[in-house]
Structures are given as C-alpha cells and as structure tokens.
Amino acid sequence: MRNPNMWRAVRAPFLMGLALSAALMLLPLAALGDAPAPEGESVPTPNLLTLPAVPTPAAEPMPSPGEWDSTRTLQVLGRDGQVAEMTLADYLWCVVAAEMPASFEPEALRAQAVCARTYSLWKMGAKSHEADGADICADSSCCQAFLSREDAAQRWGEAAAAGHTAKIASAVADTDGQVLTYEGAPIQAVFFSSASGATENAEAVWGRALPYLVSVDSPEGDEVPNYRSTVTLTAEQVKKVAAEAGLGADLSGEPSTWFQNLTRTASGRVAAVELGSAALSGSAARNLFALRSACFDVSESEGVFTFSVTGYGHGVGMSQYGANAMAQSGSGWQEILAHYYTGAVLQTGL
C-alpha cells in the first residue's frame, strides 16, 4: 500500500518536469515553419492547435477464401480479334476445359487449374498483349487454349456436359488463388500432354535454364492414346521439306546416309541430328517433320524414312497424362505440382 505523504512529496516536481519536457519538444516543431522547402516539395508550418488529423488510409480488404479468382478481372483477346473482360475464375474454367480432358482425375484437374492460373499471371506480367489492350489471348500457340462453355458443352455432348462443367468448376474453386512461385514471383508454369518416361530441362528446348523446369520422372505409358506414333516420308518428301526450310542440306548421297550423328538428352529426347550435314536441334527436327515429340528414332528402307515417336508435346514442366497417372495412384494436386516444378512454392492470391 502507498504512503500518501511520500506521494505528495514527489508529485509536484514530477509534474513540473513533464511541463518543461513538453515545452522543449515544441521548439523544433515551431522552427520547421522557417526551414526552406526542398525543391519540388512544400513543408507546411505545423499548427498543433488547428492542424486536422490525417486519417490513416484504410487497407483494401483481402478477398475471402474462395473469392480470389472471382474478384480479379482480365482482358482476353479472342481469336476473332475482339477483347472481352471476364473474371479470372471464368477465364480459368475455359482454359482448363480446353487444355485437359474433363474425364481426368479431380486431382489432376486441380493441378491443371493451378498451372493455368500461374501461367496466366506470368503472362500478364510480361505484358505481351498490352498493345492489343489485353492481358492475355485465347491462342494456344501464344498463351493458352480457350474453350467457351457453349463450345465445351457441344464437344462433350448433352449427357456429359453437366457433370464435366461442375467438375472443372470445382477444380478452379478448390484451388482458388493458388499460384506457383519461385523467389516470390509466378513461375512460367508450362505443361504438355505426355512424356516418354521423363520430362525435359527447359534449356534443352528453349535454350534457357530455369531452376524449376528440370527433368523429372513421369509415370504415364502405353495407356495414353497415341503414345507411340509414326510418321513416314519418302526421300523426295524429305528433300522437299529440307529445301523449303532453307537448310542447305547436301542430300546427293544415298538416303541411308542422310541422317547422321543423332545425340540425345538425359531424358531420351533428340538433342541434335544432322541431315545431309545440316545441323538440327531435336525440337527443330520435330517441327520440320511434324512429329508429336522430339523423342524419336529415324530409320530408312528402300527410300522411305520412318520416324518412330513416343509421347506428345515439348516435354517441359507438367505432363498432363503423368499428372493423371499420379492422381490415379493417390497423389494430391499439391504433390503433383511439387513433383513437376522443382523448388516452386504455392502462394495464395498474388
């Protein structure tokens, strides 16, 4: 319990000290009125009696779970050249419907939704369609494939449309706002159809290494439609293709000698091959001869070349059929994404 007399003895000097401290604190503030303003700025003279309080700006409310995609809009350049505004949720539905079979496992579809969302944000950051007044386009050769709800329903048929529509909507909603990042930024979340046992390093296809796009095992196989395919071309057709491409290939010798020095990457895809002494990368050969992937062998018999091909797509990032195989084996969408994008981290609502 306090001693009242002792408190009265110390209270008076204590209050006088407070008053003196307050007066000293006001001196620097009064001096600010005479200080010259920095160039391009103004320094107002403070008046502690009349200066109105400055309200603290209210922070933008964070979207609730399940509302990240529905509260973000983007401008989509259609194949008809028109730009349409839509929510990210609606756009992602159209991308997932176009890019992955709706019959796939729900966890594979969720993984695809995250890839589509992440790639969209990465592409928007690149501003490649700024001149068009758009954030992204509906051309799969540039951005991502896009299928309207009406076109999707027509493709699926009346019996399947309702179920597939709900399944894809769930894949988008269940991963709402989830983005794959590396060092805090959205990754280039590329994907493809099916791998020949392993995915490919980014530098083997595009000449630039990315730490999250490295070769990993992929579990799909002969259950994939057209997993193994062949392309046959006559010697004359090969000559014509090489000439039209301007390769400058010397194809004067026997056809059996035209393809030489084929080398492979660690994943089994063709790294390089020579056609009549003209050097081609595996990706260039794939495009030149319209092959489904760069994982191929080439043989010749009686002037006919046979390309034996495995898998489909460029081979970098997530294999869609591999993701479905992982889902069938019990993997969740997070595990699928962690497998195919090495070191990438999931974040919410960038």
Image (cartoon, helix red, strand yellow):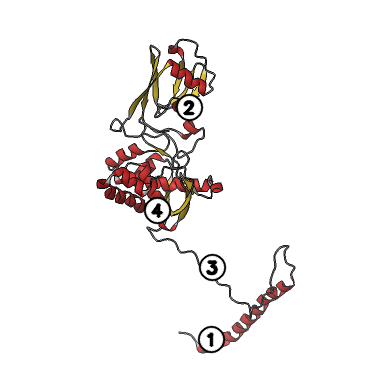
Q: Considering the numbered disc 3 on the image, is that residue within a helix, a strand or a loop?
A: loop
Residue 102 visible (yes or no):
no
Q: Earlier in the sequence, mark 3 or mark 1?
A: 1
Find numbered disc 1 in the image and state the secondary structure of the residue it sits on.
helix
Residue at point 59% right, 82% down? 14
- The image shows residue 50 at horizontal and vertical percentages of 63, 80
Q: Secondary structure at mark 4?
A: helix
Q: CA distance from mark 4 to mark 3?
A: 29 Å
The Cα–Cα distance between marks 3 and 1, rounded to whole angstroms, is 44 Å
Q: Which mark is residue 36?
A: none
For the residues labelled 2 and 4, the Cα–Cα distance comes to 36 Å
Identify the disc placed on residue 7.
1
Q: Report which residue position mark 4 lands on.
A: 89
- For the residues carrying marks 2 and 1, which lies nearer the camera in this image? 2
Q: Is residue 291 above or below residue 249?
A: below
Marks 4 and 3: which is nearer the front?
4
Q: In terms of sequence position, does the residue under pointer 4 or pointer 1 come before the other? A: 1
Q: CA distance from mark 2 to mark 3?
A: 55 Å
Check contact, mark 4 vs mark 1: CB within 8 A: no
Marks 2 and 3 close (CB-CB < 8 Å):
no
> 105 and 13: which one is in front?
105
- The mark closer to the camera, 4 or 1, is 4
* Mark positioned earlier in the residue sequence (4 or 3): 3
Residue under label 3, please give it: 57
Give the residue type that dot 3 points to.
Pro
Label 4 Cα crowd, 10 Å radius (few <14 / some 14-19 / many 20+): many
Q: Decide which of tag 2 and tag 1 comes sooner along the chain.
A: 1
Q: Is residue 203 left or right of residue 109?
A: right
Q: Is residue 128 above or below residue 270?
A: below
Q: Quadrant of the N terminus?
A: bottom left
